[in-house]
Image (cartoon, grey):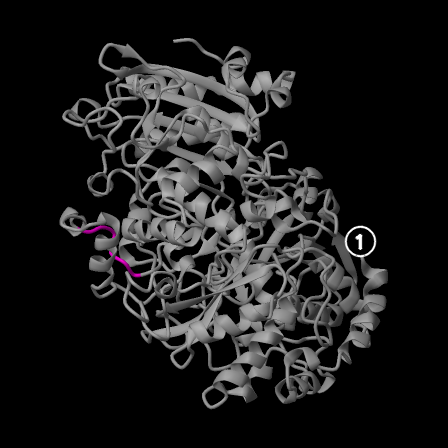
Amino acid sequence: MLMKSLILACLAALPPASGLPQEAIATRTAEAVTTARGLENAAEVVRAAVADGLIPGAVLLVGRGDEILLEETFGERAPGVPMTADTVFDMASVTKSVATGGSILKLIEEGKLRLTDRVDAILPDLVPADFGGAATPVTVEHLLLHTSGLAPASAVSDFEGHDNAVDGAIRTFTARPLRSVPGAAFAYSDLGFITLGKIVERVSGQPLDVFTREKVLLPLGMTSSSFGPLDEERLARTASTEPGTPLGVVHDPRSRAASGVTGHAGLFSTARDLGRFCALLSGATATDSSALEASTVALMTKARFVPSPKRDVEKVAASSNHADHGTARALALDVQTGYSSPRGSLFPRFRSFGHTGFTGPCFWIDARTDVWYVLMASRLQGGKNPSLSPLRRATADAVASATDVHAPRLAPAVQTGIDVLETEDCARLAGKRLGLITNVTGKTASGKRTIDVLHESKNANLVRIFSPEHGLFGKLEGKVGNATDEATELPVFSLYGETRKPTPEMLEGLDALLFDIQDVGVRYYTYPSTLGLAMEACAAAGVEVIVLDRPNPITGRRVSGPLTDADRLSFIGWRPMPLTHGMTIGELGKMFNAEWGGIGAELTVVPMEGWSRGMWYEETGVPWINPSPNMRNPTQAVLYPCIGLLEGANLSVGRGTDEPFELFGAPWIDGKKLADALRAEALPGVEFTPIVFTPDAAKFIGEECGGVHITVVDRDAFAPVAAGMAILWHLNDLFGQDFNAARGDSRLLSARTFEDLMGAGHWREIPPAWMDDVDGFLHLRAPYLLYK
């Protein structure tokens, strides 16, 4: 076996093709050579699998865009026949992505088909009228996402005894009751893609194999790929499968019963050809647009949330990616399901995609770095049928490690206030008796608690701890009592129990009170209120306040929404600020101290180093720690100004589910109706998907709720306050008899804005009176900003 990390000779052997032009990869840089050497670890993973007898042979191909980084062959393609790079494999379900998915997307690109087209309208002679139900007809999109409700498979006998095997099978299996309402649950289905294959034929006027070859395969230069029967030259280099199956005959029994041309299986291909398809989906600029245009590729590869059936959740939980939650697909592509073993643990969730085939092949692509890999194997050779999931995961992780797929776009050395203080060994605190307001988020970059940094420093004398809402560990709901920190045996006084402001007795004997808690940048999140009340108490007691600054997770540039009414200030609206203020907790402290009559406390802010106002949380390099029980990731912080607006109304905002603040609903909501209305608004950067869920905490415990899941696809374009306004208006418009509109203002806290919203003919007609207030706030905050 020859390690072909540079593979210039291999490239010279490739047929001329627009998909991977030779001139685009004629020169390898030193960086690429280093990467290829690192990829030897991936090759070693596959080599070991062959040596251990897991598979008889394989081909591994790794690329970035239209550049090949590594190609290596292992073992045999048939007993006594060495594996070669041009070996032809039965692609099984990879057919769904390449042939059927590619063809369907081409028809959409040509304007001949839409995702929302009803299947019964396209195939009226094959499927029942109102297939899926008059209210929820099965669409092309349902089939592509495996949410049609069709069963996973059917008996081979469904294909037998008909003049046309596929037509007869479709008539038979679509006449059976669906397993779920269309759109209600993800359930992987061969039958859905068999139907899609027929749709390609009906809409294009050509057989599936012919249309796929002319519109997808040949434009990409995939000249070794086709449905069967194979010509003699390709047949001679085809990998064997299980005993009794002739070379070049599709293994899948349903496809075989339909002469080997179906939408779910039947394609034969090589690693190099599949690499060309990966280059297309990665967005390689050198790829010929005659295959699929860039906008079509973006449509195909965009992750879409799909409701998870219980069995899929269990499959994900049982996998090595046990910490992952949520199910997502792209069009004819896997993203995050129980079938996602080729993602491994390092290719990112929801930003990478690919597919597997039962016979052994798989591919996976990272959308940000354009890195992809193809692993071709024939696991059925010799009658074996081993699971390839562990091999795929190990290969994926080795590829990701070698190519930095898992590295963040930016890896700045952002130091929070406590990191800065720790580097000084707390020198500025020498001689002071200290109190500390903190919770579980108060940690250094290395994960050490701020409590322990102060307790162990020779320059600090920590004598008292204070906890905010949700307690010291950020896990409690409701009132919180006083406690003791077990590690230091220091008392912990609750500021969300009998009092929300430190009492004179609590502050007695302190020289300074430090504050180190992660905020989320939204007005109704309560930690800034805790800071403000503590500053008032410290000003009265003559105690210095020291704020250890932390990032605003939703950047320092987002300032939007009406100001709190002056007569409605409260713990969730402590000062008249917009819904999103675009300030750090340290900057807020400076503003609290001077504005609105001023507090006049002795205030010191320990600024961060390396942070800038345009950074999203993931770009800071600061580890995410849940600041409260239902704020579990940065995406939920991005959505909080939108879905958090709904919290006071008679709705569930996802508390008691795996995705709080990413979905909302109620028993009286028709999720599809609401999602359709919101999608029609074409709000930037966000998608709406109907969902059914049952909360196990907070509102509607144990009750099935219809609702909407919100997916942020472009957080820079996403306008959360506008989206929240749109949701409130549509809830009142569609479900006014059930929606408690009077409670809908409990987070907005702007009577005029809410009255205008509820009385408007459309939410976009709201007079933008509060925009002047936002402009005024921008001027007000300017002197207190610490970062550019």
Asked if residue 561 is positioned above or below residue 740 in the image, the reply reads above
Residue 249 located within the stretch drawn in magenta: no
Residue 129: quarter of image? bottom left
The one of 332 and 457 positioned closer to us in this rendering: 332
- x, y percentage for residue 420? 70, 43
Give the residue drawn at x 50%, y 47%: 106
Residue 643 visible somewhere in the drawing:
no
Question: Quick check: 351 left or right of 557?
Answer: left
The one of 600 and 169 positioned closer to us in this rendering: 169
What residue does disc 1 label? 786
**Magenta-colored span:** 149-154
Q: Main secondary structure of the magenta part?
A: loop
Residue 620 visible somewhere in the drawing:
yes
Give the residue drawn at x 30%, y 55%: 187
Name the element at disc 1: loop
Quadrant placement of the N terminus: top left
Question: Quick check: 19 left or right of 756?
Answer: left
- x, y percentage for residue 606? 74, 50
- Dot 1 alpha-carbon crowd within 10 angstroms: few under 14, some 14 to 19, many 20 or more: some
- x, y percentage for residue 284? 59, 34
The one of 38 and 154 positioned closer to us in this rendering: 154
Q: Amino acid at mark 1?
A: Leu
Residue 152 located within the stretch drawn in magenta: yes
